[in-house]
Image (cartoon, grey):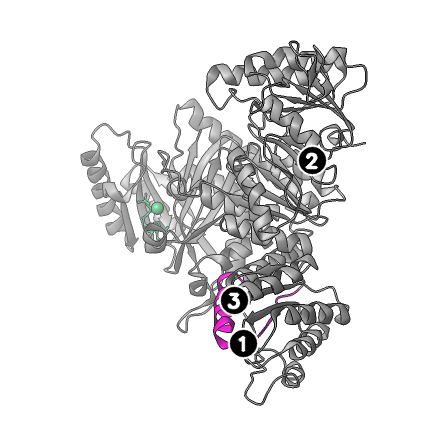
Amino acid sequence: MNELDPIFKPRSIAVVGASRTPGAIGHTVVKNILDSGYRGKVYPVNPKADEILGLKCYKSVLEIPDEVDLAVITVPARICPAVIEECGKKGVKGAAVIASGFSEVGKEGAELERKIVEIARSYGMRILGPNIVGIMNNPLKCNASFGPYLPYPGKIAMISQSGALVIAMDARTYVDKVGMSHLISIGNMADLDFSDLIEYFAGDEDTTCISLYVEGIKDGRKFIETCRKVISTRPIVALKAGVSERGAVAAASHTGSLAGSAKIYRAAFRQAGVVWAYNLNDLFNRSLALSLQPPMKGDNLLVITNGGGVGVLATDAAERYGVPLKDAPEELKAEMRKAMPEFGSPKNPVDLTGMAGAEWYRSSVEAALRHEWVDGLVVLYCETAMTDPVEIAKAIYEAKQAAGVNKPVTVSFVGGEAALKGGEWLQTHGIPFYRSPDEAVSAIAALREYGRYVETLREGAFTPFTDVDREKVREILEGARTDGRKALLEPEAKEVFRAYGIRVPPGKMATTEDEAVRIAEEVGYPVVLKIVSPQIIHKSDAGGVKVDLRTADEVREKFREIMENARRYDPNADLKGVYVQHMAPWGTETIIGTVRDPQFGPTIMFGLGGIFVEVLKDVTFRVAPVSPDEALEMTAEINGADILRGARGEKPKDVKAIAETIARLSQLVTDFPEIKECDANPVIVYEDGLSVVDARIILS
Ligand code: ADP
Ligand code: MG
């Protein structure tokens, strides 16, 4: 038996706070459980009542003569600790705490919340909530909530952090005939969180897709690990609310100001293998497809239509959702030509023309699904005066049966009542139906996204580099801390990078002109001089950087100039000296940086440098650590990826070297939690290799 079975497969339920007053939550919950057809035992608990809705009422759970699996608690928050205590004594193993007035209202509530969890733990009881609508459970025909009825039956387990949305989505399931096994309100997640429920529903035989409405995740690492573990058995799709940028939180580093929770959630979901939903409609659409259809196992998507317009819309959508249409091979085109008039088009999208009736749909759909090139199929139909949508629907279904292959199909019928009827017929036969080509394509793109995750997440594990010097890094970090400094000096930051095998130009700090010249000769001309001072973070702003120095005289002159500039810039600054380093040749400027996210811990960013990062914010994130393979994906997914591939006759840049640097830096910030933020900016990339010419590390 699973630890959560008492909550999701209860044989008996006590409603604590049951009420005789119609309209009260404690009344509605009892009534809903009875009305929905639950066949287990129901025990209302209320010290002031003898009978509720024809059921004997108990003064306390302790008086109930039988075992109780689940307690649904509707009493006010302040009474909850006492009730949970009694449930514990009774041996109840699961509680759904509907009551609100906990951490969502402030400090006192948070204390109550902490208390009920503590009591529950001491009895080995798990808590769903508090502050929830309840649990809607279709397989058990049990509506243990104050929502009006069970959702339209199906295979999606939907878990929502918003209670209001639970009730709204419940009603919505009937409009679109999107079927759910469970609709669950997760509330404050005082005990059970998304990860716990995901793990449970991945093993639930009545569920084929787990669908999430997420406002915030408490333990990001646990979430990623849990999802990765289960996605080969169940797809997970999520809508993240609140994706506008979190204000730049007093960030001392560049990366800090670019990191918004939105980008990090997007990255984390990708690493977790969670399919992204773009909005609420899309969450329904994608959940439906994932619950009914198999994953799409390759990138070859074919579109069959009876009208050019919807075909073009589908083509646009395919590109937007990451499954761009490709040219079909000649044999497939020849097959398609058999089922269309002379003026039809066998290309992708295949246009059967407005004359296409059920037979043409039947033969083209069957041939397409049978053809090995096709990995997934979107069938579009525009209502016409000559054809019957229900006939077309039946033909599509029968063709899929006849083809006998496990490839995903989504459809869109555009038109009026008749088209809807045809579409709904298909949906009740397991083929998801949408009202627009865009939605049908988004749905199949979700099946491809899922397919990709299943293929790639199996590999992708991070293997730490062993040629790193942790001791060295620890010493440098401790040195800074003893000095009371939060930002490392550039020479220190470079030393740290070097200890992790990250390529930085050779250099040393000089305190006199003579020393500067000596170092310049050692590292080789041309050189760069930079001010070293704990108070000067942005060195160029202080006139503290001089590049391309080629002689000893130049070095002497610029040494003096830098010291003067710095003194003028901040008369109180402690000037440690001047960093003399070999000047790296010109190349493509990129940025690699890290920040610590409150939910996901260390995260790493990559983007093109200079104007691209300042203005276009063309960057991408991952939760650290990342393997070089994963990091390579990052270099391909920024908008300016073509610049790295070698645009306008330039040679391709060494993206492998970038990927290795990202991976090494991600290991550094994972190994040292005291590193709050760091920037390698710029990282100059060449056809062969790269050089990290500026380094910044901020400690927490
Ligand atoms: P800051 O960002 O604090 O102003 P940097 O160390 O980034 O200072 O130096 C400013 C600019 O000088 C860099 O963006 C880079 O273009 C150039 N630069 C700095 N160091 C080197 C180097 N070793 N080789 C080549 N160019 C360099
Ligand atoms: Mg810089």
Q: Which residue is mark 3?
A: 415
Q: In this picture, which residue range is highlighted in magenta?
A: 298-323
Decide which of tag 1 and tag 2 comes sooner along the chain: 2
Asked whether 302 falls inside the magenta stretch, the response is: yes
Residue 57 visible here: yes
Residue occupying the point 53% across, 60% down = 439
Decide which of tag 1 and tag 3 comes sooner along the chain: 1
The mark found on residue 385 in the picture is 1
Looking at the image, residue 81 sits to the left or right of residue 102; the answer is right
Give the quadrant of residue 408.
bottom right
Q: Which residue is mark 2?
A: 36
Residue occupying the point 37% across, 45% down = 519
The kind of residue tagged 1 is Ala
Residue 451 lies, with reference to residue 482, above or below; the image says: below
Q: Residues within 10 Å of mark 3 (few under 14, many from 20)?
A: some
Residue 303 image position (x, y, % from top left): 58, 72
Residue 437 image position (x, y, % from top left): 52, 65
- For mark 3, give the secondary structure: loop
The mark found on residue 624 in the picture is none
Decide which of tag 2 and tag 3 comes sooner along the chain: 2
The kind of residue tagged 3 is Gly
Residue 680 image position (x, y, % from top left): 42, 46
Q: Quadrant of the C terminus?
A: top left
Of all residues shown, which one is farthest toward the front?
54
Residue 686 image position (x, y, % from top left): 44, 61
Observer-nearest residue: 519 or 13? 13
- For mark 2, give the secondary structure: loop
Residue 127 lies, with reference to residue 308, above or below; the image says: above
Asked whether 135 falls inside the magenta stretch, the response is: no
Observer-nearest residue: 580 or 641? 641
Residue 541 lies, with reference to residue 651, above or below; the image says: above
